[in-house]
């Protein structure tokens, strides 16, 4: 089996690729070839005995998609995007990367399909940002898309494209609306949601973290571990079970900032919590206030997608995976 990962240099891309090497996909053919692509050069995974090609590639550039697809992969993971804060700050770049790049990829697959009959599986990383505005506290699976940010609008349009290209038979597709990933390892990025990770990640290593919103802010979160499992499950799921609705809200936890801090206190004590410094930021608060607070993802749960049961589990997973099981 040949898998292409676009956005392989990102945090989720790296962790997902490592999981493919370390643990075979259940019920799938053996992985014999990997193509890893991003705007910066991905790193070849250690321990892979098959063929691995790394590519520096920008989907907004001419012929980039055709080059990515030259090996005719069986499964294409489209994880590449610019994040919410950057998409809001740079309107042109957001639409170029998040929308135009995605349509360019889909169009390239369509043209090859029309010539050769090649029909890969496409797994698209969408976002809960497709919902916005005056929504209920718990959003059901049949709720309409009402994004209130440019990033959410871009993802919503791509979901519609995915559904239409799938309907027309150009590829098999599934869209996963990923929750906010917490705790993200590494340095902060430009996502407006970055502080959700920062207020846990930094105190665990003895560093100060900035909290720009009130403790009462509620959000939908899952761990990097769960995000990787979502992607793995999408590789072998019977896509006929999706019917005509290929985009799914993934399961997660509906957690307030206060809940996060309480979990941090239970695990790392008052010393860690004291490193959280409150610095209200109206721009961040305005963006976050327009995001979904909770979901009832019955379709995804029925199809076998799972997540953690408590935020303590999410912190403990971060400590185990990123800190060697120890905290400052």
Image (spheres, rainbow, N blue to C red):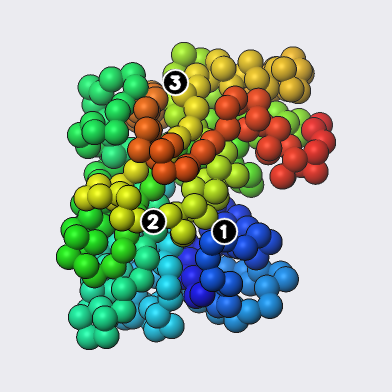
Query: In what quadrant of the picture does the C terminus appear?
Result: top right
In the picture, residue 172 is in which quadrant? bottom left
Between 22 and 196, the residue placed more toward the observer is: 22
Residue 117 % position (x, y): 26, 81
Q: Nearer the viewer, mark 3 or mark 2?
A: 2
User: Does the rendering let one see residue 80?
Assistant: no
Describe residue 324's horizontal placement relative to residue 21 as left or right: right
Q: Earlier in the sequence, mark 3 or mark 1?
A: 1
Q: What element carries label 2?
A: loop
The residue labelled by disc 2 is: 238
Q: How crowded is mark 3: few (under 14 residues within 10 Å), some or many (20 or more)?
A: many
Q: What element carries label 3?
A: strand
Between 326 and 245, the residue placed more toward the observer is: 245
Q: Residue 120 carries which label?
A: none
Compared to residue 150, the image places residue 210 above or below, namely: above
Residue 223 % position (x, y): 57, 38
Q: Earlier in the sequence, mark 3 or mark 2?
A: 3
The residue under the point 37% across, 65% down is 121
Q: Are marks 3 and 1 in contact (CB under 8 Å)?
A: no
Q: Residue 26 carries which label?
A: 1
Q: What element carries label 1?
A: loop
Compared to residue 26, the image places residue 243 above or below, namely: above
| Cα–Cα gap, marks 3 and 1 | 35 Å
């Amino acid at each position: 089996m040949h898998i292409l990962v676009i956005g392989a240099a990102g945090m989720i891309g790296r962790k997902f690729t490592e999981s493919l090497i370390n643990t075979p996909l259940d019920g799938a053919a053996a992985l014999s070839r990997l193509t890893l692509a991003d705007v910066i050069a991905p790193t070849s995974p250690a321990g892979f005995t098959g063929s691995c090609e790394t590519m520096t590639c920008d989907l907004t550039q001419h012929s980039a998609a055709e080059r990515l697809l030259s090996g005719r992969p069986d499964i294409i993971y489209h994880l590449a995007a610019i994040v919410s804060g950057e998409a809001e700050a740079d309107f042109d770049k957001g639409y170029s990367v998040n929308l135009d790049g995605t349509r360019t990829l889909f169009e390239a697959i369509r043209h090859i399909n029309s010539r050769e009959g090649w029909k890969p599986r496409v797994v698209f990383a969408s976002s809960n940002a497709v919902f916005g505005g005056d929504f209920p506290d718990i959003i059901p699976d049949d709720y309409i898309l009402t994004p209130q940010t440019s990033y959410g609008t871009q993802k919503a349009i791509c979901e519609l494209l995915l559904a239409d290209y799938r309907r027309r038979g150009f590829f098999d597709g599934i869209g996963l609306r990923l929750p906010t990933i917490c705790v993200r390892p590494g340095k902060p990025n430009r996502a407006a949601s970055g502080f959700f990770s920062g207020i846990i990640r930094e105190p665990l290593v003895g560093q100060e973290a900035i909290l720009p919103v009130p403790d009462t802010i509620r959000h939908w979160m899952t761990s990097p571990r769960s995000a990787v499992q979502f992607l793995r499950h999408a590789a072998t799921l019977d896509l006929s079970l999706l019917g005509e609705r290929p985009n799914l809200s993934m399961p997660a936890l509906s957690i307030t900032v206060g809940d996060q801090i309480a979990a941090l206190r239970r695990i790392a004590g008052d010393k860690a919590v004291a490193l959280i410094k409150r610095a209200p930021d109206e721009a961040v608060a305005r963006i976050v206030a327009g995001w979904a607070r909770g979901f009832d993802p019955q379709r995804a749960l029925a199809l076998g997608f799972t997540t953690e049961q408590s935020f303590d589990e999410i912190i403990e997973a971060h400590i185990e995976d990123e800190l060697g099981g120890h905290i400052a």
